[in-house]
């Protein structure tokens, strides 16, 4: 005999197993719903809503991931490596407008010019702030001579401004170096 004969204690334990088994079965049957397609809807106010369940009335369906319609052909495909992670293509679609190399070079030249102007301005501001900062020991202003906290506050602000302008200069140089 594999199971002990039913007793009051044993039957009570089995009665408690039923709800657990029922809950587990319900949870497993609900799992496919969690893997349903995610659809994109637009409400009357123009808000975009994503949902995996049918929407309430009044929502306009824009697209669904995984559907076999032409609109989903341009949607990202699942990689399968990690559930829920999408792989995006780095190539432009054939319908994407192309720019000839002369136009792109002209755009890059304008961009470089604008960035160089910004860099020049930032370098001037950095030089001014460094002069005012005087390596952390600027001359106290008349009202700061009696108030040391006010002097320290000004030094901290100048230090922050030097840092901000230096970061801007570095970022602009990096951006300019990246232009073709």
Image (cartoon, grey):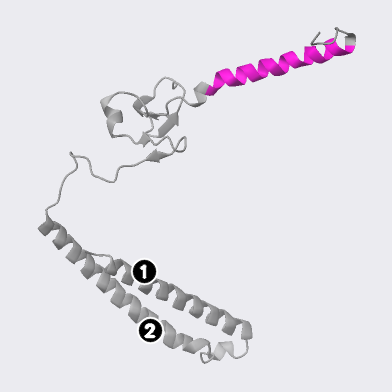
Mark 1 packing: few (<14 Cα in 10 Å), some, or many (20+)? Answer: few
In the image, 107 versus 32, the foreground residue is 32
The answer to whether 144 appears left or right of 66 in the picture is right
What is the magenta range?
A: 9-31
The answer to whether 64 appears left or right of 36 in the picture is left
Q: Main secondary structure of the magenta part?
A: helix
Calculate the distance from the C-alpha at mark 1 to the C-alpha at mark 2: 17 Å
In the image, 138 versus 52, the foreground residue is 52
Which residue extends farthest front? 1
Quarter-wise, where is residue 148 in the image? bottom right
Rendered location of residue 64, percent (x, y): 37, 27
At horizontal 37% and vertical 27% (from top left) the residue drawn is: 66
From the viewer's perspective, is residue 146 above or below residue 112? below
Rendered location of residue 39, percent (x, y): 40, 28
SS at circle 1: helix
At horizontal 42% and vertical 32% (from top left) the residue drawn is: 49
Q: Examine the rendering and report whether any part of residue 42 can be seen.
A: no
The answer to whether 70 appears left or right of 87 in the picture is left
In the image, 138 versus 140, the foreground residue is 138
SS at circle 2: helix
Q: Name the residue under label 1.
A: 171
Mark 2 packing: few (<14 Cα in 10 Å), some, or many (20+)? Answer: some
Quarter-wise, where is residue 16 in the image? top right
Q: Name the residue under label 2.
A: 127
Magenta stretch encompasses residue 27 = yes
> Where the N terminus falls, by quadrant?
top right
Q: Which of marks 1 and 2 is nearer the N terminus?
A: 2
> Where the C terminus falls, by quadrant?
bottom left
Q: Residue 32 carries which label?
A: none
Q: Examine the rendering and report whether any part of residue 103 can be seen.
A: yes
Rendered location of residue 45, percent (x, y): 39, 32
The answer to whether 53 appears left or right of 13 in the picture is left
């Amino acid at each position: 005999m594999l199971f002990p004969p039913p007793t009051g204690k044993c039957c009570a334990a089995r009665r408690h197993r039923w709800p657990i088994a029922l809950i587990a079965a319900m949870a497993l049957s609900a799992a496919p719903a969690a893997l349903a397609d995610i659809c994109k809807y637009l409400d009357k106010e123009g808000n975009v809503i994503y949902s995996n369940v049918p929407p309430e009335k009044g929502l306009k369906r824009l697209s669904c991931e995984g559907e076999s319609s032409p609109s989903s052909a341009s949607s990202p495909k699942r990689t399968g490596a990690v559930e829920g992670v999408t792989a995006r293509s780095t190539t432009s679609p054939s319908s994407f407008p192309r720019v000839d190399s002369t136009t792109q070079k002209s755009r890059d030249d304008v961009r470089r010019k604008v960035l160089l102007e910004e860099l020049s301005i930032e370098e001037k501001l950095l030089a001014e702030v460094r002069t005012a900062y005087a390596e952390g020991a600027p001359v106290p202003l008349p009202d700061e001579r009696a108030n040391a906290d006010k002097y320290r506050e000004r030094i901290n602000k100048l230090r922050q401004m030097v840092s901000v302008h230096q970061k801007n200069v570095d970022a602009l140089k990096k951006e300019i170096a990246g232009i073709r």
